Image: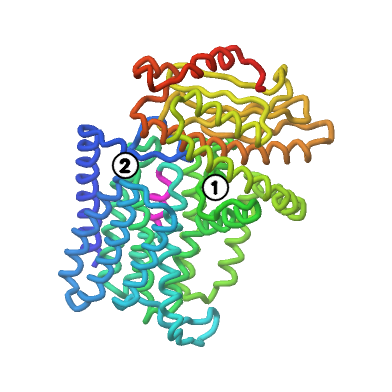
């Protein structure tokens, strides 16, 4: 059987490598960057990068599935169901890569596909209570358990796909685990082994600096496939070691997702809104390189992969010890990277978050209006003035907007800049375009965040006022992200509406009827940095 697994792995590697290589060549030649290179405000790449890496993974899966199902013809029905459901989830994600669907539509599609898996015979029908021999027949709840498991796995992989190589590496470890867990169900091990080879080929192109992304198509496909294989390899769909073992490997995305839900819930942000508060973003802001972040995540996941093997081999006999070791490592890692600094002041953090909810809700309303103004404004100067208007409403003192040809600066009151906290957000897909927002902080020394996104403007507060200054910096960091996101959407809408580049001097290429005389009169005040009236 080892030889057959190696054949599946080599086949998966060869097909994935070849298809990804052809995809990259086609993308560079045709340059469908509006679709294949769709970018997101919370991603920091400068040049558009293809999001079609999932095609290579899906192609390798089809070849390996055909081989494995031919060998194990007696399980053809269940294996074919896995293939159909996994490819349907891939199609949903690929559709979103090409034409953004929105969170609600994607979730609805995931629920439909997971429900189809249940009616095709892939279900969690029983639940075994850990550390006991008692088994509970789920009955009607089997459908809910199955749908929840598949949808949760699908989104966990997608949520960690924020740094080059991270989702692919964790998925690789999960497939390694599944090739062992599925030993009692031959085709599960074959499919998992094939995906190990496919993911190795994908990481050749996705490891930092990435040449291609797996996109939502690849992430949805991998997450759904992992959920399906864990159910298929478990004994009669019972929650036993076969289902618990992958949860250890997914410790990082589970922890990250849980913290994100709590954070967004406290702040009043939409639960499905993307942000730059994930663990890998925090590691990047701490000074680690992209490769360093990925390697730290790999090391963390490898440890939990070992715990997953222990949980499977000993059939949960040492589950309390295994879980205790996992919690200890999480706490040590959180302390090492200063993630737990505020865990012991939960009351203050919760109070600050709740007090900011109304301001954030107000900011969301303002930035939605700004995003819609992008398709209504006749000139970029008008759009910039709308951005300044929203910035003033949110309490910012300065606004600096850089486009492809020039920059403009607005400020509320003259300031020497010594106590000005700045938040700069680059426009994804552009080398020089950014928006920079400033607010006067109650401290004499504030660091300036000028990275790919806003960073904490926190310095060595030796005057005993650190709590107030940190809270102000964190609040305006969130507000700056919301405003910058609205500005990016508005600018994108304006470019799409007028089919023009993001340049202040774009009026030279247009008919005089497209711009009013008020545009010309507005330019001097912006260039001379006059105070905002």
In the rendered structure, does residue 169 fall within the stretch colored magenta? yes
Q: Nearer the viewer, residue 43 or 532?
A: 532
Per the image, label 1 sits on a secondary structure element best described as loop
Per the image, label 2 sits on a secondary structure element best described as helix
Give the residues in magenta: 165-173
Residue drawn at x 58%, y 34% is: 454
| Residues packed near mark 2 inside 10 Å, few (<14), some (14 to 19) or many (20 plus) | some
The residue to which callout 2 is attached is 204
| Residues packed near mark 1 inside 10 Å, few (<14), some (14 to 19) or many (20 plus) | some
Q: Position of residue 385 (x, y in %)?
A: 55, 26
Q: Residue furthest left?
A: 70
Q: Is residue 428 above or below residue 192?
A: above
Res. 466 mark = none
For residue 270, side relative to residue 102 (left or right): right
Q: Are marks 2 and 1 in contact (CB under 8 Å)?
A: no
Residue drawn at x 48%, y 59% is: 250
Q: Position of residue 311 (x, y in %)?
A: 48, 70
Q: Position of residue 457 (x, y in %)?
A: 67, 32
Q: Residue furthest right?
A: 464
Residue drawn at x 30%, y 50% is: 54
Note whether residue 465 is visible.
yes
Which quarter of the rendering shows the C terminus?
Answer: top right
The residue to which callout 1 is attached is 278
| Disc on the earlier residue, 2 or 1 | 2
Which quarter of the rendering shows the N terminus?
Answer: bottom left
């Amino acid at each position: 059987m080892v030889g057959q697994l190696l054949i599946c792995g080599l086949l998966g590697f060869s097909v994935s490598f070849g298809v990804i290589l052809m995809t990259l060549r086609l993308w560079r030649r045709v340059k469908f960057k509006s679709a294949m290179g769709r970018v997101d405000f919370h991603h920091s790449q400068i040049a558009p990068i293809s999001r079609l890496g999932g095609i290579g993974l899906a192609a390798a899966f089809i070849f390996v599935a055909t081989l494995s199902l031919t060998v194990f013809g007696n399980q053809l029905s269940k294996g074919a169901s896995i293939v159909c459901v996994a490819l349907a989830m891939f199609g949903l994600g690929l559709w979103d890569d090409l034409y953004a669907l929105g969170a609600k539509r994607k979730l609805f599609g995931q629920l439909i596909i997971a429900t189809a898996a249940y009616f095709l015979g892939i279900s969690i029908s029983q639940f075994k209570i850990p550390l006991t021999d008692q088994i509970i027949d789920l009955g009607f709840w089997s459908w809910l358990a199955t749908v929840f498991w598949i949808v949760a796995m699908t989104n966990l992989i997608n949520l960690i796909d924020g740094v080059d190589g991270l989702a692919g590496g964790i998925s690789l470890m999960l497939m390694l685990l599944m090739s062992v867990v599925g030993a009692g169900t031959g085709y599960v091990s074959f499919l998992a082994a094939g995906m190990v080879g496919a993911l190795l080929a994908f990481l050749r192109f996705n490891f930092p600096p990435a040449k291609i992304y797996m996109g939502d198509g690849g992430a949805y496909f991998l997450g759904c496939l992992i959920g399906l294989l864990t159910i298929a390899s478990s004994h009669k769909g019972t929650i036993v070691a076969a289902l618990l073992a992958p949860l250890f490997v997914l410790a990082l995305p589970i922890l990250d997702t849980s913290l994100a839900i709590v954070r967004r819930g406290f702040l009043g942000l939409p639960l499905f809104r993307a942000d730059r508060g994930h663990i890998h973003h925090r590691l990047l802001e701490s000074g680690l390189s992209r490769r360093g972040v990925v390697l730290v995540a790999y090391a963390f996941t490898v440890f939990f992969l070992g715990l997953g093997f222990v949980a499977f081999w000993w059939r949960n006999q040492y589950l309390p010890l295994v879980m205790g070791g996992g919690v200890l490592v999480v706490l040590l890692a959180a302390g090492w990277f200063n993630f737990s600094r505020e865990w012991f002041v939960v009351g203050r953090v919760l109070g600050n978050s709740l007090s900011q909810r109304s301001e954030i809700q107000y900011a969301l309303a303002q930035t939605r209006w700004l995003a819609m103004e992008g398709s209504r404004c006749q000139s970029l100067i008008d759009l910039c003035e709308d951005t300044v208007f929203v910035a003033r409403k949110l309490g910012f003192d300065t606004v600096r907007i850089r486009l492809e040809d020039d920059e403009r600066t607005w400020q509320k009151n003259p300031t020497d800049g010594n106590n000005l906290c700045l938040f700069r957000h680059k426009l994804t897909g552009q080398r020089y375009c950014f928006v920079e927002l400033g607010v006067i902080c109650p401290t004499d020394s504030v660091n300036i965040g000028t990275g790919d996104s806003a960073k904490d403007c926190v310095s060595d507060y030796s005057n005993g006022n650190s709590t107030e200054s940190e809270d102000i910096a964190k609040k305006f960091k969130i507000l700056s992200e919301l405003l910058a996101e609205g500005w990016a959407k508005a600018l994108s809408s304006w470019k799409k509406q007028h089919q023009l580049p993001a340049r202040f001097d774009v009026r030279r290429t247009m008919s005089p009827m497209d711009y009013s005389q008020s545009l010309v009169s507005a330019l001097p005040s912006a260039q001379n940095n006059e105070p905002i009236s």
